[in-house]
Image (cartoon, rainbow, N blue to C red):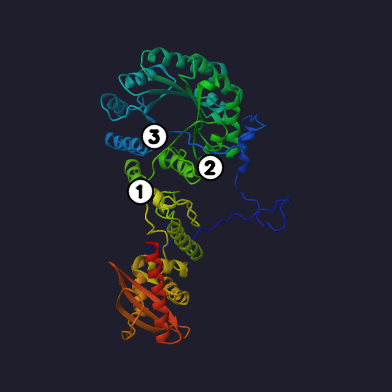
Amino acid sequence: MTAIPFPTLTTPAGPVPPDAPTWNRQRTSDMPSHRYASVFDRVEVPLTDRRWPHRRLTAAPLWVPVDLRDGNQALSEPMDPARKRRFFELIVAMGYKEIEVGYPSASQTDYDFVRLLAASELAPTDVTLVVFTAARRDLIERTVAAVRGIRNPVVIHVYTATAPTWRDVVLGRDRAALKDLILAAGRDVLALARDLPDVRFQFSPEVFTLTEPDYVLEVCDAMTTLWDAAPERPVTLNLPATVEIATPNVYADQIEYMHRNLARRDSVILSVHPHNDRGTGVACAELAVLAGAQRVEGCVFGNGERTGNVDIATLALNLHAQGVDPMIDFSDIDEIRRTVEHCNGIPVHPRHPYVGDLVHTAYSGTHQDAIRKGLAAHRRRAAETEVDERELAWRVPYLPVDPADLGRSYDAVIRVNSQSGKGGIAYLLETGYGVSLPRRVEIDIARAVQQRADDLGAELSAADLWALFQERYLPAVPLAPTATRVDVTILSRHSCPLLDGGILALIEYRTGDRVRWVGGRGADAAAAEAAAVDRAQRMHDDERDRA
């Protein structure tokens, strides 16, 4: 196996900035940061009396998954018809009521999928279908042809880039000429789709975040006037962070400016479409809703161009964790993940919020101890209050939501490696094999487990812990049978010396169909056995009282 050379940086450290505090030893780098301008040097951010910081998220916005269009465009291998259909069926089953289904003028696959929706009953009648098109007459004609005959409500979504760099470099039009182009597209949509029975319109000034506020307001108001937006037939204005260019508070200011200054505001559905170039797409969306947005476009688990679209699963479950109904069903999150991974051909990261394999897992000893105690307290409160554990208020340290809410078991909550402590080890032995040990014995076995994990340089499973437990404690000489107070079947007794000089007694017993182990510690075998019997009796009495 070829060794990988250790990377070296040959650039010497720069000087300490003159205004740096004495405790900060960071030095200037040779990164060419001077090439880039801040957002405040690129576009006016006119809002100063902002109101969004004082608001709270109390209800879910209208979620619009764009996986079938924007997400699909970002795949190295776009979805074939079968995968598109499977993804569509998934998001319908989850409860999404407005879904962007394709870009029918961009590919035959997208066009055919929209025609499938027109020819079948795949889309429930209460689901609104969104189709996407650039502001060009031939593309609009193709888009309208694709949706003709659909029984569902339809939104035709027209977009054009409006920011100065895009106007100058890509489109070659000044402000007035670009506005004329946008309005011409709006008139084409109106003329071509006028006879459709249940159609609404949507406009996106692409790269909204880098467009002059007065210009984007002028264009959006012109479109709502052209399309005669009304409360009973609103126009969606979608204001995308096509490329993230600032901290989330700046996006919130830009959204609030539009929210407070748009004409026909009661006839506008204000929508946002954040990307994740700076890694703050979720924060941008949350602050945008505080600032007045009513609708959020994004992808389930955040697939999309470059670093992705905003992750609408994380957004929804953030609401759930704050006691707000997300209006979408994530109760089988592993099945959702399997489907999304299959359709996108992209694995979900194990640390991805809420859905990753390791998001409910603790290796650290202090975390494990707190989680173990929190779960025990939760079960105890449920028994004392006679409230179902699934209905009881959730107050378990380090777990922002109950894994059971997402269809997860508690099996992966605590896992053991060399960083783990006695609490996690005890939890796995207790939940996996019914072993309940006194604190001193937990300390004893934790030392052995940490040594084994260090030697192996790997994680230890519950089966590994059980094997180590048997190796360390069970080969000892069995105790002679004695009378006990426990109203259970005693299967075996064992004792062995501990590192601190005491004796551990282990009782294996059965209650109903469940076999358990209980340990007791004492100065000699008799005292240790008596302690184990007392411990087993208390556990038995507590369970009987709860039942």
Mark closer to the chain start, 1 or 3: 3
Q: Is residue 531 left or right of residue 27?
A: left
Q: Position of residue 306 (x, y in %)?
A: 46, 39
Q: CA distance from mark 1 to mark 2?
A: 25 Å
Which residue bears the numbered disc 2? 280
The secondary element bearing badge 2 is classed as loop
Relative to 230, is 283 above or below?
below
The secondary element bearing badge 1 is classed as helix
Residue name at image x 49 percent, y 14 percent: 228
Which residue bears the numbered disc 1? 334
Q: From the viewer's side, name the closer residue of 455 and 288.
A: 288
Residue name at image x 44 percent, y 37 percent: 305
The secondary element bearing badge 3 is classed as loop
Q: From the viewer's side, name the closer residue of 487 and 263.
A: 487
Relative to 85, is 33 above or below?
below
Residue name at image x 35 percent, y 25 percent: 104
Q: Amino acid at mark 2?
A: Thr
Q: Position of residue 56 (x, y in %)?
A: 57, 39
Local packing at callout 2 (Cα closer than 10 Å; few below 14, some 14-19, many 20+) is some
Q: CA distance from mark 2 to mark 3?
A: 24 Å
Quadrant of the drawing holding the N terminus: bottom left
| Among the 4 quarters of the image, the one containing residue 454 | bottom left
Q: Amino acid at mark 1?
A: Asp
